Image (cartoon, helix red, strand yellow):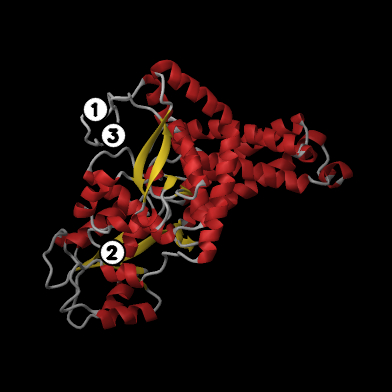
Amino acid sequence: MFKISNHYVSKIVFVLLFVEVLVLVGAVYAGAAVRLLDPGVTTGARFDHFFTSAIAFALAMIFSMSAMGMYQLNFNEGLRNPFFLKLMPSFVMGFVILTLVFYVAPELYFGRGILLLVFVIAGLGIFLARMIFFKTSELRFLQTRVIFLGGGPLAKECGDLAEQSHKYHKYDIAGYLPIPTEELCVPPSSLLKVRDGDSLVSLANQYNVEEIVVSVQNRRGGFPIKELLECKLQGITVTDAATFFERETNQIRVDSLQPSWLVFGGGFDQSYFRAFMKRGFDLVCSSLILVLTFPIILVTAALIWLEDRAPIFYSQERVGQDGKTFKVHKFRSMRNDAEKAGKPQWAAQNDPRVTRIGGFIRKVRIDELPQILNVFKGEMSFVGPRPERPFFVDQLVEVVPYYNVRHSIKPGITGWAQVRYGYGSSAEDALQKLQYDLYYVKNNSLFLDVLILIDTLKVVLFRSGR
C-alpha cells in the first residue's frame, strides 16, 4: 500500500482503477468509431469537446462504481454474482449522472446511438479487465513475504490479520521470530528455524522477506533494535504493529497502542489551511445537499406530522469540538415518549420506540438532513466523528482509552466510523467506532472526506453501516 494525503490506498485497487479509467475512455472512442465507421471522426469540428466528453463519461462511471462498492475488492469472490449485481446498478447510476452532465453542458453530448454503444463496449471492457485482474492476482509476485518479530498475543493477532487480508493486500507469512521474554501464542510449527550466529538480516535474506512487522508488546530486554536498523538499511521494510493495524484495517487499535506512537507519529493536521479547506468543503457540500434534497425535506416533514403530529424536528444536546456541547437537529424518528423515564438510552437497531416513518427515514439517513443547519452554524462538519450525548460521553471516557481524542475536531453528519462499521449500541461498539474515528482524526484530509462521501452514498443505497 501507499499513502495519498495520509490515507492508505491499496496499490492493487489503484492499478485496477487506472486500468478501468483507460478502458472507459477508450470505450467512448471505440463507440464513436463503430457508430460512424470512421476512426478519425472524433477529430472533426462536431467533436471539439470529445476528449472532455470521454473524461466526463469515465469519471461518472468510476464514481458510480465506487458508490456501489466495486472497488472494495474481495479476491475470494472474484467475478461471482456480486460483481454483476453491482455492475448493472452502477451503469444505471452513471447514465443518470451523465444525463445531468449533458443537460448542464450540452456541448459534451455525443448522441444516443454512440452512447448506447459506449455503454455496451464499456461493460465488456470492465468485465474483461476484472477477469484478467483477478486471474493475475493469484500470482505470487503480488504477495508480500513477511516475518513477524514476536510470538506473543500481539504477534498472533497480527498474523491472523495478515491471513485474513484477502481484500486489498495478500501476504505470504514466512514465520514468526519469538522474543525470549514473551509468552508463546503462535503454533510452534510456524516459528522460524534459527541457527547459531544467524542475524535478523541473514534470516530475512534466507526467507526472501520483504517486510518485518515488529509485533512485540514489551520491547525491554532482548529487543534487536540494531538488527532492525540494519534490515532497514538493507532495503527491508520495518513496520510496527500499530502501523500494520492502521494500514490493514484503516483503524487505530487502542489496545496495542503506545502513547508515544500518537505523539511522534505523523498526521493530526490541525493547521489553519486544513481548517480553511474543510470549512469550504462543508459549506459547498451542505449547500448542494440542501438544494438537492429540499423537496424530500418538505415531504418528510409532512409525513412525520401526519403520523405523530408535532414536533417535526428533534433537538438534542451533543458533545462537539473541544468538549463543548451544542444542540444537534434531526427529524424526529421516535415517539414523543421515547425517554419518558428521564434516563438516556442507547438506540437499538430494531428499537420499538421508532415510528413507522421514523424507521424508514433512519434507514435511508433522511433523519440526518436537518444537521445541515448545524454545519452552516459551524458546530459540525459534513464529515467527522459522530457527536455523542454528554451522558454517554461521561461513561465512555471512563472505560474507552483515548476517547476524548475524537473531540479534537468538529463532529460530522457522516464519518469514517459510520461507513465502515455496522450499527452500534454498546461500549464495545463505541470502542470499535472510536478506532475508526481515531484513524480519521489522525489522517483527515480533503481526499479522505471525498472517499467518505462516496462510501456514504453506498451505505444509503445498501442500507448498511449506522
Q: Which of the two residues, 85 or 295, is positioned nearer the viewer here?
A: 295
The three-letter amino acid code for the residue at tag 1 is Lys
> Residue tagged by mark 1?
340
Left or right: 30 with respect to 464?
Answer: right
**x and y percentages locating residue 349 in the rendered image:** 30, 31
Q: Is residue 365 above or below residue 228?
A: above
Q: Disc 1 or disc 3, which is closer to the eye?
A: 1
Q: Is residue 103 above or below residue 385?
A: above
Q: Which of the two residues, 102 or 140, is positioned nearer the viewer here?
A: 102
Please tell me how many numbered marks the rendered image carries: 3
Q: Earlier in the sequence, mark 1 or mark 3?
A: 1
Using the numbered discs, state the Cα–Cα distance from disc 2 to disc 3 in whole angstroms: 45 Å
Which numbered tag is attached to residue 174? 2
Which numbered tag is attached to residue 347? 3
Using the numbered discs, state the Cα–Cα distance from disc 1 to disc 3 in whole angstroms: 14 Å
The three-letter amino acid code for the residue at tag 2 is Ala
Is residue 414 something one can see in this rendering?
no
